[in-house]
Image: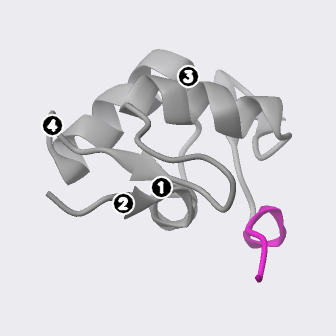
């Protein structure tokens, strides 16, 4: 199974135009990419959805919002 880049998750969040909690984001990722999907970023590989969400949070990719967090296109690196 191919690995999904974390940028695709951030783009999914932007497109949805809704805030997420950690749990609701993991659920949305699972619904969109499947329960067996693995993820990677520019510096990490072979992550679960939960590990990806934790990693993105640790990198400051989320913006606090009412009832959770969102993200913005400027949070996606361009390299």
Q: Is residue 77 magenta?
A: yes
Q: In this view, does 51 lie above or below 33?
A: above
How far apart marks 4 and 2 lie (CA) works out to 11 Å
- Which residue bears the numbered disc 3? 21
How far apart marks 1 and 3 lie (CA) works out to 14 Å
Q: Give the range drawn in magenta.
A: 73-79
Q: Where is residue 19 in the image (x, y as percent from the top left)?
A: 59, 38
Q: Please tell me which residue is depicted at 59% across the width and 56% down the height of the picture.
A: 41
Disc 4 secondary structure class: loop
Horizontal side, residue 23 vs residue 60: left or right: left
Confirm whether residue 51 shows in the render. Answer: yes
Q: Which of 71 and 4 is in front in this view?
A: 4
Labels 1 and 2: the sequence-earlier one: 2
Nearest to the eye among marks 1 and 3: give it: 1
Look at the numbered discs 4 and 3 and tell me whether their residues touch, using CB distance below 8 Å.
no
Q: Which disc, if any, is residue 36? A: 4
Disc 1 secondary structure class: helix
Please identify the quadrant where the N terminus is shown: bottom left
Nearest to the eye among marks 1 and 4: give it: 4
Q: In this view, does 39 lie above or below 76?
A: above
Confirm whether residue 69 shows in the render. Answer: no
Look at the numbered discs 1 and 2 and tell me whether their residues touch, using CB distance below 8 Å.
yes
Q: Please tell me which residue is depicted at 56% across the width and 65% down the height of the picture.
A: 7
Q: Nearer the viewer, residue 53 or 41?
A: 41
How far apart marks 4 and 3 lie (CA) works out to 21 Å
- Which residue bears the numbered disc 2? 4
């Amino acid at each position: 199974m191919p690995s999904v880049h974390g940028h695709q998750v951030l783009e999914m969040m932007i497109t949805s135009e809704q805030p997420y909690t950690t749990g609701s984001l993991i659920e949305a990722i699972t619904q969109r990419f499947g329960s067996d999907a693995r993820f990677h970023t520019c510096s990490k590989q072979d992550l679960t959805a939960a590990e990806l969400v934790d990693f993105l949070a640790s990198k400051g990719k989320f913006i606090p919002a009412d009832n959770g967090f969102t993200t913005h296109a400027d949070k996606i690196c361009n390299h």
